[in-house]
């Protein structure tokens, strides 16, 4: 789980709406399970084949934009 720094928040806003909704659903389920002390049933676990870094490219894009903005301001 990522700490929601401003870069992460901006990256999440850039996700397609369906991916944002799926992310929120996963976070809600995790919170509910944590609150009740339960574990996600094994049949609902993500397999390595299903796992993908859906947010990474957006984070990298935001970070690059921040670097570019800082470099432009220095000139």
Image (cartoon, grey):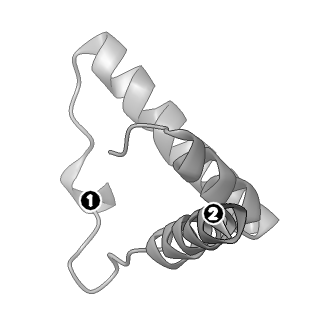
Which one is in front in this view, the residue at disc 1 or the one at disc 2? 2
Figure disc tally: 2
Q: Residue 60: percent from the left, percent from the top?
A: 49, 74
**On the image, numbered disc 1 is attached to which residue?**
45
Task: Write down the residue under mark 2.
Answer: 74
Q: Is residue 68 above or below residue 28?
A: below
Q: In the image shown, does 54 or 14 lie closer to the viewer?
A: 14
Q: Residue at x 62, y 45 (%)?
A: 9
Q: In this image, 65 relative to 43: left or right? A: right
Circle 1 packing at 10 Å, graded few (<14), some (14-19), many (20+), is few
1 with respect to 37 (left or right): right
Residue found 58% across the figure and 41% down from its top = 6
Report if the CB atoms under discs 1 and 2 are less than 8 Å apart. no
| Category of crowding for the residue at label 2, using alpha-carbon neighbours closer than 10 angstroms: few (below 14), some (14–19), many (at least 20) | few
Q: Is residue 69 above or below residue 60?
A: above
> How far from the left and from the top, in percent, is residue 34?
30, 21
Q: Quadrant of residue 64?
A: bottom right
- Horizontal and vertical percent for residue 14? 74, 65
Which residue is most to the front?
A: 75
Q: Quadrant of residue 74?
A: bottom right
Front one among 27 and 53: 53
As helix, strand or loop, the secondary structure at mark 1 comes to loop
* Residues at marks 1 and 2, CA–CA distance in whole angstroms: 47 Å
Sequence-earlier tag: 1 or 2: 1
Residue, x 60% and y 70% (percent of image)? 71
Q: Position of residue 58 (x, y in %)?
A: 58, 72
């Amino acid at each position: 789980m990522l700490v929601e720094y401003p870069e992460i928040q901006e990256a999440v806003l850039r996700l397609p709406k369906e991916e944002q909704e799926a992310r929120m659903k996963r976070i809600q389920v995790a919170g509910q399970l944590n609150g009740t002390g339960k574990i996600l049933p094994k049949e609902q676990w993500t397999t390595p084949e299903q796992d993908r870094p859906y947010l990474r490219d957006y984070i990298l894009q935001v970070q690059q934009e921040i670097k570019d903005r800082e470099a432009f301001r220095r000139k």
